[in-house]
Amino acid sequence: MKWMLDIDINAPVNKIAYTDKIFVIGSCFTEHIGGRLADLKFSTLQNPNGILFDPTSVCGSLLSYINNKQYSQHDLFYLNELWQSWQHHSIFTGTNAEVVLTNINQSQQRAHHFLKEASWLIITLGSSFSYRLATNGETVANCHRAPAQTFNKHLISIEEITSCMFDVVHQLSSFNPSLNIILTISPVRHIRDGVIENNRSKARLIEAVHQVSEQLDHVHYFPAYELVIDVLRDHRYYDIDLVHPNYAATEYVFEKFTESYFKPETKVLVEEVKNIVTAFKHKAFQPSTSAHKKFLKTYYDKVVELQIKNPQINFESELAYFNSTL
């Protein structure tokens, strides 16, 4: 008896290798994928503006990286005793405007240079709802708990989404001709908008990204949304809030991602890296014993050998740990 639906994942001809740089941007589900890639020692940069949910904010941020936009104090606003940016997550807020701007502009520069050299860009869209300033219609990426009357809520149309996506993809192709793009839809439910409204929002995203991916060979669709909603399709795969997929669900999605998007040799190397990372996280109760010292020596030798074969992977922390008491 079958307990799960089958789903076809169209794997790209070009696949991910450890020599690739991977830029990850979008919703909080993006950070699950980006975090797993970083844990496995891939060269990644994720969400230079912080978490972004709607296509307008994502596209605007990508264009700012292409152009290496540098922000000024004119781009900030002061609220609740903090300097903040409408285009950035609250992780960038602070009491000193100069420090806030320095952090934002350093992040912009890192994003500009990394995106120029990246082989892959993973975009995860979360919602078709956007918030726009009531004063001038500017789209905001984060509301920063400003009063509700500060904004007008807008459900972005499919035409608006496809237009901004096509525009940014074409500009990305000119900026970095080697870039491959993966589009995904977050399975996180935005129930604050309402269950029905969330489904309308997701439907628009799905249709729009398919219009883009079906017309451009270097743009691919990975069905993270369908894997959770249609394959797992059970509330036990969500956290207690019934909104965010839990660890089992995100691991399942990531396994499907690696199966479809990693080169065969990458999959083999992933298992070796995973073994080392697991050993690195192991904390001994009796670190002075000869058994633990033997454990450290064994893994130190493994890392050295793997580092020689794969100099692009950064094992600096692991080497320091395994060599700490030898």
Image: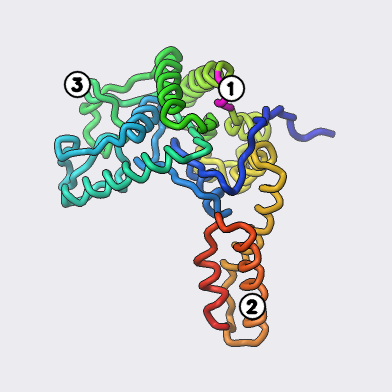
> Which mark, residue 167?
none
Q: Quadrant of the C terminus?
A: bottom right
Q: Main secondary structure of the magenta part?
A: loop
What kind of residue is marked 3?
Asn
What kind of residue is marked 2?
Lys
Q: Disc 3 to disc 2, how far (Cα)? A: 62 Å
Is residue 194 visible to us here? no
Q: Is residue 55 left or right of residue 153?
A: right
Disc 2 is placed on an element classified as helix
Q: Is residue 101 left or right of residue 258?
A: left
Name the N-terminal-most of marks 3 and 1: 3
Toward the bottom, the furthest residue is 289
Q: Position of residue 235 (x, y in %)?
A: 60, 38
Q: Quadrant of the N terminus?
A: top right
Q: Which residue is mark 2?
A: 297
Q: Nearer the viewer, residue 300 or 311?
A: 311
| Magenta highlight range | 216-220
Q: Disc 3 to disc 1, how far (Cα)? A: 37 Å
Q: Which residue is mark 3?
A: 136
Q: Disc 2 to disc 1, how far (Cα)? A: 47 Å
Q: Nearer the viewer, residue 215 or 174?
A: 174
Q: Residue at x 24, y 30 (%)?
A: 148
Name the N-terminal-most of marks 2 and 1: 1
> Please, is residue 222 above or below residue 208 in the view?
below
> Please, is residue 195 above or below residue 102 in the view?
above
Name the N-terminal-most of marks 3 and 2: 3
> Please, is residue 289 above or below residue 309 in the view?
below
Q: Which residue is mark 1?
A: 217
